[in-house]
Amino acid sequence: MFREIIDALKKGPTTPSTLARELGVETESVRDALLILEDMGVVEEVKSGCERSNLCLFCPLAKSCNKVSFKSFRLKEGK
């Protein structure tokens, strides 16, 4: 499952629940795998829920981004 998570994160930051849905596994399993990958230095948590970029123009949460709190993960640079 680690390889599948890494491949999915190559598309950009996402949440554990979204990854779980894409991979067809339990969210808790994805959270556990992400914590292991984070400890290994492969992924990192995106602290603000999402990062401001040009992609925000298309995000349905753009107007409430600062008000919504959820964990999102991304690949660390160079990984």
Image (cartoon, rainbow, N blue to C red):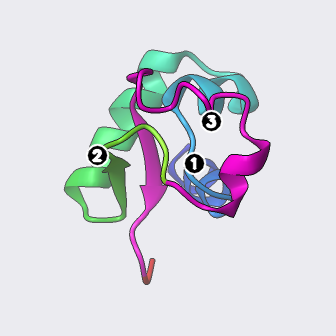
* Magenta-colored span: 52-77
In this view, 34 is above or below 25 = below
Would residue 35 be found to the left or right of residue 65 on screen? left
**Magenta segment includes 73:** yes
Q: CA distance from mark 3 to mark 1?
A: 25 Å
In this view, 42 is above or below 36 = below
Residue furthest left in the image: 39
Q: Residue at x 50, y 30 (%)?
A: 16
Q: Secondary structure at mark 2?
A: helix
Residue 46 pos. (x, y %): 37, 48
Q: Residue at x 47, y 55 (%)?
A: 74
Residue 10 pos. (x, y %): 64, 64
Q: CA distance from mark 2 to mark 3?
A: 30 Å
The residue that disc 1 covers is: 5
Mark positioned earlier in the residue sequence (2 or 3): 2
Residue furthest front in the image: 63
Quarter location, residue 21: top right
The residue that disc 3 covers is: 62
User: Mark 2–mark 3 contact, CB under 8 Å?
Assistant: no
Q: Can you tell which mark lies on residue 36?
A: 2
**Pick the front one: 48 or 6:** 48
